[in-house]
Amino acid sequence: MKKSTYPALLSLDGAKQALVEHTESAKQALQKLDIDATFFIRFNRFNCCA
C-alpha cells in the first residue's frame, strides 16, 4: 500500500512548492494578529524554507 504523503501525491517539487505556499499563508495569518509574531516567523525561517 502506498502512503498518501505530499511527495507521493504531488511529487517532490510539488511538495516543496506546497510547503512554501503554506508557510507564506501562515506568515500572513500571523501578521494579521494583534501580537508580536517575530518569534514564530523566525522559528519558521530557521526550520523551513524561507
Image (spheres, helix red, strand yellow):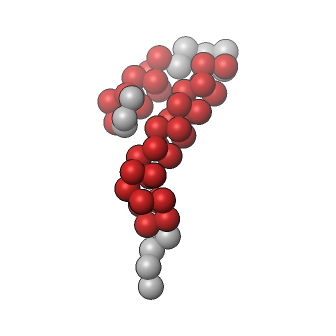
**At 48% across and 59% down in the image, what residue appears?**
10
Vertical position of residue 8 compared to residue 29: above or below: below
**At 44% across and 52% down in the image, what residue appears?**
15
Q: How many labels were placed on the picture?
A: 0
Instruction: Report the front residue among 28 and 42.
Output: 28
x, y percent for residue 33: 66, 20
**At 59% across and 33% down in the image, what residue appears?**
25
Q: Quadrant of residue 49?
A: top left
**Image quarter hosting the C terminus:** top left
Instruction: Report the front residue among 45 and 2.
Output: 2
Q: Residue furthest left?
A: 46
x, y percent for residue 6: 47, 59
x, y percent for residue 27: 54, 27
**At 54% across and 40% down in the image, what residue appears?**
22
Query: Seen in the image, is 28 located left or right of residue 23?
Result: right
Q: Residue furthest bottom?
A: 1
**Image quarter hosting the N terminus:** bottom left
Q: Quadrant of residue 2?
A: bottom left
Vertical position of residue 16 compared to residue 48: above or below: below
